[in-house]
Structures are given as structure tokens and as C-alpha cells.
Amino acid sequence: MDLGIQGRKAIVCASSRGLGKACALSLARAGCEIVINGRDREVLEATAKEIRAAAGVEVAAVVADVGEETGRKTLLAACPAPDILVNNNGGPPPKPFRAIRREDVLAGLEANMLAPIALVQAVIDGMVERGFGRIINITSSSVRAPIVGLDVSSGARAGLTAFLAAIAREVAKANVTINSIQPGAFDTDRLAAGMSKQAELRGVTLAAARAERQAAIPAKRFGRPDEFGQLCAFLASAQAGYITGQNILIDGGVFPGAF
Ligand SMILES: NC(=O)c1ccc[n+]([C@@H]2O[C@H](COP(=O)([O-])OP(=O)(O)OC[C@H]3O[C@@H](n4cnc5c(N)ncnc54)[C@H](OP(=O)(O)O)[C@@H]3O)[C@@H](O)[C@H]2O)c1
């Protein structure tokens, strides 16, 4: 399917690995010029090379911390007028509710709510003027259904979701859309690190911990990052101009509601 976004410029935050990388790759395959981002230069350069080879498009690699204002300025300097913005960042570490300190909450809000809001504010008027814009936020299924230990993550991302709901309606008439994708369990480095920790804590093998978690998912497997990336590319497509202010769950059927 031709997504109608060939030559569009996209900033994909936190995209040297995992879900962000999958989004960058899918957008590149759709013909977009991409700015990718991460803090580790070596990993980021390797990803840029991989995407260039796979898609034959221009890929700029920006080493920056998207959680910091200077980092965001560097990203915007590399692509001052993006048509597509994918907001992503590392997630707050899991922590028991009673151990969460004020600083943990503030750090989570900064990384997963305030950073994406700042980027949306920086790019939205240009998108409106140009009559095309697609903003996609990577949030989490935990916004919709609680996950014990991820309170900071869920709270910050729910805040982001509500914060952007009104502006999404305001800019819809200019063909600018704002949507979020809520991932369930996807097989990325973050998931692998979490699984290793859990296996260690519970004294079971990593294979046993993975099998148990997958057995609890109706699809009986973890999501593949490329499945996530392709959903992101569709939301960024020309065809998706009538989808806005939505939160798309992609979780292999874990959420039990019909709506
Ligand atoms: N995977 C899942 O199952 C799942 C489920 C629900 C929600 N999520 C959320 O989705 C997001 C992506 O998850 P993932 O699984 O793709 O994680 P991942 O595999 O750990 O990849 C994270 C990516 O973000 C980059 N990054 C992290 N912090 C950054 C920062 N401050 N500035 C710039 N880049 C940064 C990392 O590169 P560097 O480390 O080099 O900076 C890496 O490229 C996270 O917020 C996560 O909580 C994931």
C-alpha cells in the first residue's frame, strides 16, 4: 500500500532501538526522510546505516537526550519543519507504589509527559500552516489498564494523553492529527531487561518467565516491533487524515474489553 508520504520529513525520538527504531524503519520504507535519535552514538549510527541500506532514504542521526531542552533543540535543528513527529522516550523504571518518591514522579513527568508536549508545541503551528501533520505518541497499554509497579509511567502517559486531546480536535481541520499508540508486551531490549530481572527475583529461568508471560497473552506471543512500526506508519499516512485524538491499543488481545 502506498502510504502517500514519500518525501515527508519525520522526527522519530528515541529510535536507535526497539519500538522507536521500528517506527523509523517503517516510515523510511514509506519514503520519508528520517531523523533518528538516541544517546548512544555507536548504536544510533549503526541503526542509521541499517535504515539507509533497507530503505535508501536520507537518515540523520542525532545524538541527544530527548528529555532535556538542549536535546530537543538539537533534534529540531536537524529538522526544523517536520511533517511527522513520533514522540518516544525511555520509560520510568518499575517501582513498588510505596517506594516511589516525589523525585521519581517528577522525572517520569519530565520524560514521558513534558518532553513530548514541548515537541508538539514546537512543531504544531508549522504543520498547520503547511496543511499536513501527523503526531504519534508512543504511550502504553498501562494508560488503559493498570500494571502494578508502573504507576509513574501510567500516570505521566495518561497526563500526556489528556493534555493533547483538545488540541487534536483544534488542528484537525488543518489535516494535522495527533494519536497515541498503546503497546502491550513487545519483544524489545526493554522487555528483555524486565524479564531477566523478574526471572532473577523469582528464581526461575528466563525461558520459563518468558513462556509464562506469553501464555497470559491471547495471541500467545509477544508483539514484534515491526508490527508496531507499521501501525505507526499507517497513522502517519495520507490516508489516516480522518483518525485523530485516538489511542490505539496493540496488545495481542490482553485488554479484555469489547470497546
Ligand atoms: N516494549 C514494550 O513492551 C513496551 C510496552 C509498553 C510501553 N513501552 C514504552 O515504549 C517506549 C519504548 O520502549 P522500547 O521497548 O522500544 O524500549 P528500548 O528497547 O529500551 O529502546 C529505547 C530507545 O529509546 C532510546 N532512549 C532512551 N532514553 C532516551 C533519551 N532520554 N533520549 C533519547 N533517546 C532515548 C534508547 O537509546 P539510548 O539508550 O541509546 O538513548 C533506545 O533507542 C518506552 O517508553 C517504554 O516504556 C514499551
Image (tube, rainbow, N blue to C red):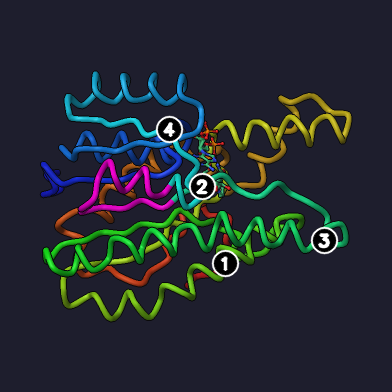
> What whole-number distance in Å separates the C-alpha atoms at marks 3 and 1?
18 Å
Asked if labels 1 and 2 touch by Cβ distance under 8 angstroms, the answer is no
- Is residue 252 among what the camera can see? no
Asked if the magenta segment contains residue 75, the reply would be: yes
Q: Is residue 182 left or right of residue 169?
A: right
Q: Of circles 3 and 1, which is in front?
A: 3
Q: Is residue 227 left or right of residue 213?
A: left
Task: Establish if 91 lies above or below 174.
Answer: above
The dot on residue 63 is 4
Asked if labels 2 and 3 touch by Cβ distance under 8 angstroms, the answer is no
Q: Is mark 2 within 8 Å of ligand 1?
A: yes
Q: Is residue 139 left or right of residue 152?
A: left
In magenta, the rendered stretch is 72-87
Q: Of circles 3 and 4, which is in front?
A: 4
Reading the image, the residue beneath label 3 is 97
Residue 8 location, x and y as percent? Answer: 15, 46
Residue 67 location, x and y as percent? Answer: 52, 50
> What whole-number distance in Å separates the C-alpha atoms at marks 3 and 4?
33 Å
